[in-house]
Amino acid sequence: MLDFLNLIISDIKISIRKKNESIISIFFFIFSILILPLIFQGDQNILKKFLIGIIWFLTLLTIIFSVEKLFEKDYEDGVLDQIYISGVPLETIFLSKSLSIWIITCFPIVILSPLLLLLFNLQTDKLINIFFSLLIGTPILCMIGSVTSALVLGFNKGSSVISLITLPLYLPVLIFGIEASNSEIIFNQISQEFKILIGYLLIVVAVSPWIGGLALRLKYR
Amino acid sequence: MINNLFYVVSASSFTLLIMFLLIVFSLSSLKKREKIFNKISKNRKNE
Amino acid sequence: MINFKIFKYANPAKFLNLCDKIFIYLLVSMIAFLFFGLYQGFFNSPEDYQQGNLVRIMYVHVPSAWMALMIYSSIAVASCIYLINKHLLANIFCKSASLIGASFTLIALVTGSIWGKPTWGTWWVWDARITSMLILFFLYLGHMTIFNFSENTTKSGQAAALLAILGFINIPIIKFSVDWWNTLHQPASVIKLSGPSIHSSMLIPLLITALGFFLYFLVVLIIRMRSEITNEKINNLSFTE
């Protein structure tokens, strides 16, 4: 447990000090949202219609960019070897890595996107919906992305086709996430789409550390 | 009705075509690999 | 370690022996079932009162969709067995079943869109079930590409097994998407808790055709697995030189 926390803290420290891609990808997210009105020529109605879908799509792209080389860099540095040799189980390494990438990239997105959407004159209910659906949905995306990036770590050809493997796994999350953001909260009851999304999150959290640990083990055999 | 029949025929013929092609493809790869295997094992025996 | 009696056939030589014995029966019964089922479906079954002749596309569309889902589930189960017990045959099963599943998914998609053109007016609708079937197709493609990553069959096989298990989370979504969303697609009418809601004159040919498709899957599977086993033998021979 202590290893786990230490790994997360050191990852966050490193990424703040180095200002690497995962930090830059947040700026990518913010800028592309601010560019949107230019694309739609300031037409508020069209923009409102597509805004939620676009937010989800941009989140997905940001996560793909930041997760793609999650393990590759540490492996090339030799950091991954060092952690592995010091006796930390691979499952812990995997979980800490995917959690730290969530804290570094996704948490700012989850916090910022409702604030950014204030600029687009949306209703308050929608903002709350988007906040919660991103809060539930982004960990799923992060976990699945880290599993695939751990999978292709063992192969030389892998990194070129990682998006082909990852994208189909992302699509259900995207569909349910957008449905959940558009759903209406009636009398404080959680809508069905949210329940499906939460169920998906629970399954992924239960299954993916195990799969990710086995995937990392492919490299260390 | 003739129009509908055209759709039915095209769908079913597409299905049968794909199934047939899959069988032919698998059989040809099996034949190729067995030929290679026989050649290698014959060489092995001669040595 | 899980152990079942059927695992005594995990030895490739024993498996091939068994296949040799039953292959001809499978082939004959496949041809009989396919011929009888399709004949019954296309010429002897009643027309639908709404869709007319078009309903006959169902006899190729529905079995192939079932097969696509069934094959992916069986791949996921075999992947679990491979990861736990390290039977080579489970890996070979995954490798050879994947292409068959992908082609069944393609058949379901294409026949579905041919059916959709006269009934809905478009070739393609972005509704829940069609989209999730497309996702299934992409899952199959990813599963197939991972086997080509490396010459080492065990390594790429384990990676593919992990991917298959991860993708298996989507299968329930695909199966029940029709009931969850109320979309254009027909609700499931055969596999339901309250019993099938389809008339027996249509149901019987459908089930016979589905059985024929299943036997077809077994026949092609045996051919492909035999070819993969031969490939393994070639690799072993050339490594020991």
Image (cartoon, rainbow, N blue to C red):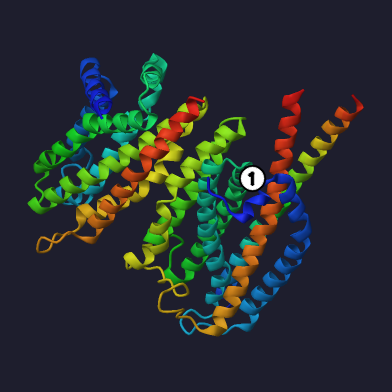
Residue C72 in sight here: yes
Q: Quadrant of the N terminus of chain A?
A: top left
Q: At which x and y percent is residue A64?
A: 34, 34
Residue A190 versus residue A200 in the image, above or below: below
Callout 1: helix, strand or loop?
helix
Residue B38 versus residue A176 in the image, above or below: above
Give the residue at x 57% y 72%. Answer: C59
Relative to C113, A55 lies left or right: left
Give the residue at x 41% y 55%. Answer: C132
Give the residue at x 62% y 62%. Answer: B15
Q: At which x and y percent is residue C124?
A: 44, 60
For disc 1, the marked residue is C89
Q: Quadrant of residue A15?
A: top left
Q: At which x and y percent is residue A131?
A: 16, 45
Residue C82 versus residue A151 in the image, above or below: below
Q: Nearer the viewer, residue A46 or A34?
A: A34
Q: Quadrant of residue A215?
A: top left
Q: Nearer the viewer, residue C123 or C216?
A: C216
Q: Chain of mark 1?
A: C
Q: Residues within 10 Å of mark 1 (few under 14, many from 20)?
A: many
Residue C82 versus residue A81 in the image, above or below: below
